[in-house]
Amino acid sequence: MVEEKIENRVKELRKSLRKHEYKYYVLDNPTISDYEYDQLMEELKKIEEENPELITEDSPTQRVGGEPRDEFKKVEHSSRILSLDNAFNAQELREFDKRVQRNLDTKQYEYIVEHKIDGLSAILHYEDSIFTLGATRGNGRVGEDVTHNLKTINTIPLKLREVGVNLQLRGEIFIKKDDFKKMNKKREEEGKNPFANPRNAAAGSVRQLDPQVAAERSLSFIAYDLVEFTDQNKKISKHEQALNFLKDLGFNINWYKKCNDITEVIKVCEKWVEKREEIDFEIDGMVLKINQLTLREKLGSTSKNPRWAIAYKFPAQQKTTQVKDIIVTVGRTGALTPSAVLKPVLIDGSTVSRATLHNEDEVKRKDVRINDTVLIQKAGDVIPEIVKVIKEERTGNEEKFEMPEHCPVCGEPVYREEGEAVTRCTNISCPAQRRESILHFVSRDAMDIEGVGPSLVDQLLDNNLIEDYADLYYLEKQDLINLERMAEKSSNNVLRAIAASKDRELNRLIYALGIRHVGSSASRILADEFGSIEDLKGLSEEDLIEIDEIGPAIAESIINFFKSKHNLEALKKLKKADVRMEKRTQKENYSQHLKDKSFVFTGALDQYSRKEASRLIRQYGGDVKSSVSSKTTYLIVGENPGSKYEKAQDLNIKIIDEDAFEDLLKGGH
Ligand code: AMP
Ligand code: ZN
């Protein structure tokens, strides 16, 4: 039994903490210092630790306490969550108003105009004044239960400021501009990709399975709609009343203005086009809603949107600034992208200092030069772009841009294929594309190195244990054992898998090298024709094109591959590590007992994937085709065979099951 005195103190502390949270987060007017607040919180935490039976869901200590989830529970919304129709100018707003007037048959209505906050919407449920469920919008019918994350948001009360209230409300979760900047700065320091915009950041945080992570992101919440509320004693007949009721309950509510007609509405909307920059979070428009709730009901909704509300979307903001430089970055696929370094300007609340120029042709088409004055624009979450060059402003000091001939990251030659817009770095060890090329190398159809996946590759790169795929063969147990999620046994397994891959067939190695355009079937042809990496290296374009299946694009990219110093070094390392670089000699080759036999599959095999089975057939000299013909030797039948089965019967083709197939592989008949 807990002493009554303690129980009372807990009640007191909770009440006081709630009051100060409300003053701090909602009213923005704290009356005690952070230190004093922390003291109260600590005292409550301590009592709860000693008396766990006193902990309640709505205690201020419970904002972050949940365990990470495996997945989100689905929540079926009790009423459909519609989206909003859009208007892009005054004309469209007037048309909306005309429709409203026609449908209502009266002019006796008011509008409430609000900010359209650029975040993601959430639906909150309160039962007996306690926050019980928070869900995302999802597809409008079914959303996800993100209660554990929403509890970490200080502007979502765990308990309402009035007793006995049951309701559902909607609002927007977002990240303030300043918090967003801080968050991205931190991410960059940690070597993580920054979020593109506050909305993505908010959405990413809400969908975290671990509430601890969500808690570290400074999310905010603003309420803008009351739904599902019935209380005989409380008469709420207007949206404005609903908003103020939500405010009384402890929420931050959306900024709003009541307007008597559409002309007034338009004035408000247009005023905010400029003023939006003064707000400390992003808004991408305004929302107008009919104030009287009975009229809303009368108007109803279409299958997608309510007829009583519409969003006015701000025009894309444009600003002029100066191009200080044009730089080239290298992406993961080796693509070189030019972008303009701009004199920083504030657009849509964020500082823009870069604009993408996409590729060489785009720079030419827009004729963007260093030192040019340009008009740039940013709309929603798209990357800022240059609308046009203001040529009247040219002084003669402008410099034309030339695509570099060497990769700015690794210095190797770049090349642009005919008919393609993109210029690429051809070096597989280019730091910009290392990770992708290593993942390709170890993949199933390439060297098939089990246990070496994205997270291990990232760790190896981050710890400078490898630079390219060839370095995998030089790893030692000591390198692996200290990595996260690696122990003695898993390290041994990885090393064993890497060693085993040294003896893969030549075609797999060729494919694994990651030569652009050279897929597994081209690799097979190249392996058959030339028999070794050494031979492949010495070929000219003419030699290559002579082969039926090899076109000029493939030929060119093979030639380019072997021009890169880094690639040649990687090949040397592979050779030194005893990786097989040529076709098996006849003696060590597999017996070719399936020579001249042609196989077709139908249905699913039990022990083998089709890929694996095909590989084995080819290994023993056989051929695999996708459809049955008179030339087919065997049809291999698995579970649920298709029409090939009947066709084989008609043509009198030998039909075998998986066991018989295995016998054939082993050399039986
Ligand atoms: P859209 O995504 O363009 O269809 O716009 C609808 C979304 O706007 C809603 O799902 C909300 O997430 C968001 N929104 C932002 N502010 C408001 C607001 N004041 N009233 C209603 N919806 C809003
Ligand atoms: Zn490069």
Image: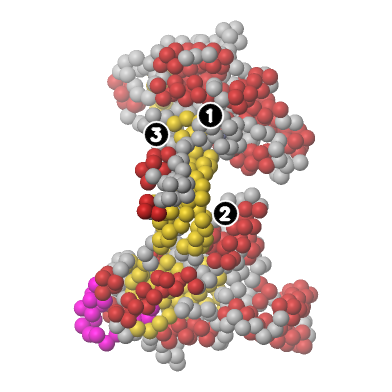
Q: Quadrant of ligand 2?
A: top right
Q: Which residue is mark 1?
A: 413
Question: Is-magenta flag for residue 402?
Answer: no
Residue 463, disc:
none
* Highlighted magenta segment, given as a residue range: 95-113
| Residue 496 in the image: above or below residue 669 | below
Question: Do callouts 3 and 2 mark residues in contact (Cβ within 8 Å)?
Answer: no
Mark number, residue 194: 2
Say which element carries label 3.
loop
- Comparing 406 with 266, the one in front is 406
Question: Percent from the top left, x then y, of residue 408?
Answer: 56, 37
Tell me if mark 2 has few (under 14), some (14-19) or many (20+) residues whose alpha carbon lies within 10 angstroms of its own. some
Q: Is mark 2 within 8 Å of ligand 2?
A: no
Q: Looking at the picture, which amino acid does disc 2 mark?
A: Pro
Q: SS class of the residue under badge 1?
A: loop
- The span from disc 1 to disc 2 (Cα, nearest Å) is 30 Å
| Front residue of this view, candidates 489 and 176 | 176
The numbered dot on residue 420 is 3
Q: Is residue 118 left or right of residue 82?
A: right
**Mark positioned earlier in the residue sequence (1 or 2):** 2
* Vertical order, 636 against 122 (above or below): above
Indicate yes or no whether the magenta region holds residue 108.
yes
Q: Nearer the viewer, mark 1 or mark 2?
A: 1
